[in-house]
Amino acid sequence: MIGLLAGVAAGIMLGSISGLLPGVHVNTMAGGLLAVQTALIPVFGPEMIAAAMIAALITHTFLDTIPSTFLGIPDPDTALSVIPSHALCLEGKGEEAVRIAALGSAGGFIAGIPIAIALLMVAPYIQGPVDWAVGIIITAVAAYLILWSESPAHALAIFLVSGILGIFSFHFGYLCVSPLGYSSTLMPLLSGLFGISILLVSGGGQVPEQRFCGLSLPRTTLVRGGLAGAVAGVVVGWLPGLSNATANAVIATASRYDRDPRGYIFATSAANTVNALVGLAVFAAIARTRNGVMVALSSIEAPPIGILVLAAALAACSAYLITVLLAGSAWRLGGINKQGLNRGVIVFVALLTFLLSGLFGLFVLVLATLTGLAPRLLNVPQLYGMGAVMVPVILFSFGIPAV
């Protein structure tokens, strides 16, 4: 029990750091735990390392909404949600946006438990047909997104151009040689498409005073967002080759972020946490790893899944409280010059990109930013930039060696 609690405490701390610092992924924290396991296991036991990894993963899904909301910097797991959450911040409702995201993650965790139990029982028997259908499912989702658009031709153009950019970025990802020895292609790609491109065209003035006047979440929004988040989380956590960034696009078929921003924030946050639990269930059921944390977990002697779920539950409760507590500091942003803040964020993202992805990462960031400006010019939603992730995944699913 001491090892479990120590692992949960360490995981909460590491997940908070990765969630609050843009560009620092929870997979990095899992790798760090592996590096020091020989010093920790003799003291706390092997369950400490496993519990820390799971707790960090769950905690990250709660706190990664904070930089997206207040700074407009997208996390790869919540790329599209930065648009409505940051927009609410600019209306003085940043704390509400973060609280909605925290509530969505909490709801996703509750919904994810029975889903994970069901997958433990059925996944070994139906995984073959599911693997075969992945490409068809994703193609159908992409086609629906485009045909559902008010301007299908423009939506298709943005989707394909961003898809070509995604293929290029992933194909030459080995060029991302950073000074820190870390490599990340997805970070500059999504930061340009959904971060800097939006900050460049945002208005001036001052950040409005942040006030929390309660949550505006009708019951229908909760139900629709919860269902959409649960479905997207299962799809992304179970099917091979997908990521939370793809889940953002899947959710957009049920909840438009421009018409129902609160519902979209709730749904994407729920999907993020459901995905984490489903990834754990898939690892336990069929020994497949859907994220870097599961890869790290596979290299150690993992305790029974019940212990890991308990660690996840303790982390979820703590992370919810931490997120709500930090959201209460939103009032400090009131009166800050928006243009100055945006410029500071852009410089920070560019510097972070260089440190994590090198000169090639900066090149991808510039290309992604230019591509991200196109939806504004064509008056289509930003979500069609998700072709940068979906097109490579579709080609990969059909065995086409484009990446």
Image (tube, rainbow, N blue to C red):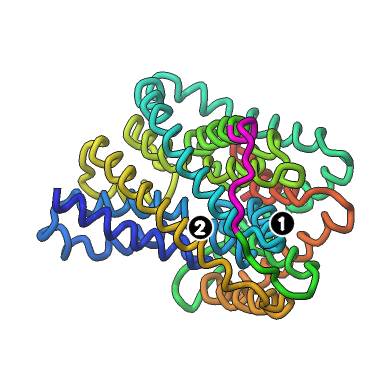
Instruction: Pick whichever of labels 1 and 2 is earlier in the sequence.
Output: 2
Left of 14 or right of it: where is 133? right
Q: Which residue is mark 1?
A: 165
The picture quadrant where one finds residue 170 is bottom right
Q: Nearer the viewer, residue 27 or 203?
A: 203
**Which secondary structure is most common in the magenta stretch?**
loop
Whole-percent x, y for residue 307 in the image: 23, 40
Q: Which residue is mark 2?
A: 64
Whole-percent x, y for residue 19 in the image: 46, 60
Residue appearing at x 59%, y 57% in the figure: 212
Whole-percent x, y for residue 387 in the image: 71, 47
Q: Amino acid at mark 2?
A: Asp
Left of 378 or right of it: where is 388? left
The picture quadrant where one finds residue 73 is bottom right
Q: Is residue 353 magenta?
A: no
Q: CA distance from mark 1 to mark 2?
A: 25 Å
